[in-house]
Amino acid sequence: MSHNPIRPWRNIDRRDSRRIMVGRVPVGGGAPISVQTMTNTLTTDVAGTIAQVQACAEAGADIVRVSVPDEASSKALKEIVAESPVPIVADIHFHYKRGVEAAEAGAACLRINPGNIGSADRVAEVIRAARDHGCSIRIGVNAGSLEKHLLDKYGEPCPDAMIESGLDHIRILQDHDFHEFKISVKASDVFMAAAAYQGLAEATDAPIHLGITEAGGLTTGTVKSAIGLGNLLWMGIGDTLRVSLSADPVEEVKVGYEILKALGLRHRGVNIISCPSCARQGFDVIKTVELLEDRLAHIKTPMSLSVIGCVVNGPGEALLTDVGFTGGGAGSGMVYLDGKQAHKLANDGMIEHIVEQVEKKAEQIEAARTVADAAE
């Protein structure tokens, strides 16, 4: 639950769910909402896949999924898991042996549809491998690959069909006394996905993995994901998420964090509050923000920076941020620290100076956190 006693209209009451572990990452049961992505390299390209996993982890990914379509990929997975700084989810479709191999290779979680694995004996073998090797399982229902009997029953993919599919798959795992699972009901249609997730949240206490699948490119996919995932998260639904973009997986991680940051559910790095710029601006806001985003990408400490082009809204925004800069015209602006005016600054030195002030503030925040942790 996100509690803000001063601004109660910002509170989000998160849905109660069971907690499972994906490797060392807790999912559900009030744990921080984790951010996932998926590699798009060939899994058999071990070096390339490891490099991409590491880049995603550096961007903030808590969990990374890797596709395991064949035996060669299963063999490569063992090397990838050994080098990964975050838990690896093995993406399994249809062939039960890949699930068994992935569990043996050290995957922290198997993404499967139990109904696609085959006979009851094969499902039991995958579940046994997951249990023996400490793997959790994600049931991944997708509107584009629903079972034929459900399409015959409902006529087309719809929320009710997705929920029924998910509950059927849950029953398979529970019949084998396996409860270390989370579940997703993804669709590319925002309305369908949102309705399916709402119904699923009422029908089970399993941790829920959120996603708007096949959302599109960087811009369109970000918008669709922000609408779909943002509204569900606002309702308190969701324990882990992936933003699915036709883009670099690192961008998926960035967008996922920005959605969580906007709702106050996770905080990582510098939250830059900036204006769209207009004729009143005292400096080039757009270029400045672009440069600052790049220069401050290394900072992981949660903090805020306001960069406003003029004095109409600048001072008010700066009151609520750790560091602020407001354009004042005549080639200079005002620097704010901890919401208070600190000093004037010439525009031509603003990038370096703002970076310096943000880095100093990050060090202060981390030092205070270290003292507080020691006191506990």
Image (cartoon, helix red, strand yellow):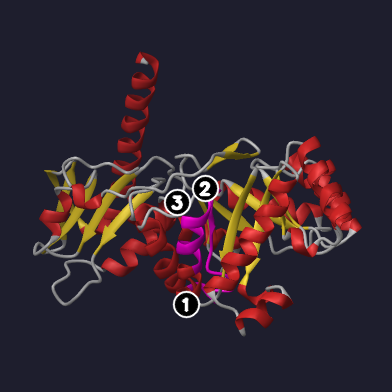
Q: CA distance from mark 2 to mark 1?
A: 32 Å
Residue 52 in sight in this render = no
The residue furthest top is 375
Residue 269 appears at what percent x and percent y? 40, 46
Secondary structure state at the residue bearing disc 3: loop
Which amino acid type corresponds to the residue marked 3 in the rendered image? Ala
Q: Earlier in the sequence, mark 2 or mark 3?
A: 2
Which residue is identified by label 3? Answer: 297
**Does residue 364 appear to the left or right of 325 in the view shown?**
right
Residue 310 appears at what percent x and percent y? 13, 64
Which residue is identified by label 1? Answer: 220
The residue furthest bottom is 155
Name the mark on residue 205.
Answer: 2
Residue depicted at x 82% and y 62%: 69
Q: CA distance from mark 3 to mark 1?
A: 23 Å
Q: Nearer the viewer, mark 2 or mark 3?
A: 2
